Amino acid sequence: MALYHVSYKNYNIGDTILPGDWGNAIKSLDSSNCRAWLDLYLEQIRLGLNTAAISRLDCIYAFNSSTNAENFAYSRSGANIYELSINTTVQTSIHNFKVISLFAGYLKHIPLALLFANKYLLDLYWTGNATSNWSDVNGYNIEYVEEVLIGGSATIAKIF
């Protein structure tokens, strides 16, 4: 399975990426930062529901589709796309990236009551799959876009 990582860092073919960049970055953010709050909250949910899943705070984020990686990079001016190679013994877990996008938007524009009314989607992020019912409390259908959390190191195989 090909995996694609989006980053502002400049890597070369053969470079090794280690997990944990986002988890380390969160430690330096103000506690009022919406994205930091969301990922810390997601980590608490993961610990309660699915400890076998890779932590978002200690992983490498990837997509299993170059198109999804390109779509993600498009909104991040200057970001690079890398195809990764991982050892077959490295653990991965697959989740719905669009849930993260939805809640990041909620934190900026939607009353907290709606965020908490849709908490079940955060639970489903850790326990669901492509066939799960990905719709919010208002019936809005959420696209399923696989996000792969890589629980170990990865090597840059190709630069796009």
Image (cartoon, rainbow, N blue to C red):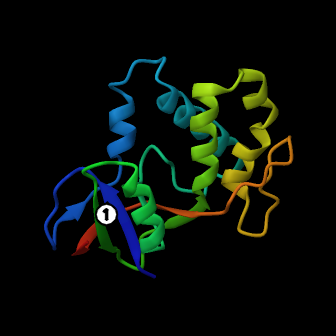
Direction from residue 50 to residue 23 in the image, left or right:
left
Q: Which residue is mark 1?
A: 153
Q: Nearer the viewer, residue 44 or 99?
A: 99
Whole-percent x and y of residue 114? Answer: 77, 29
Q: Nearer the viewer, residue 58 or 141?
A: 141
Q: Secondary structure at mark 1?
A: loop
Direction from residue 76 to residue 135 in the image, left or right:
right
Residue at image coords 37%, 56%: 73
The answer to whether 85 is drawn above or below residue 51 in the figure is below
- The answer to whether any part of residue 137 appears in the image is yes
> The residue under label 1 is which amino acid type?
Ser
The answer to whether 27 is drawn above or below residue 146 in the figure is above
Residue at image coords 74%, 52%: 124
Residue at image coords 16%, 61%: 11
Direction from residue 56 to residue 82 in the image, left or right:
left
Q: Residues within 10 Å of mark 1 (few under 14, many from 20)?
A: some
Residue at image coords 41%, 79%: 2
- The answer to whether any part of residue 51 appears in the image is no
Direction from residue 77 to residue 26 in the image, left or right:
right
Quadrant position of the C terminus in the picture: bottom left
Whole-percent x and y of residue 29? Answer: 37, 24
Whole-percent x and y of residue 25? Answer: 33, 34
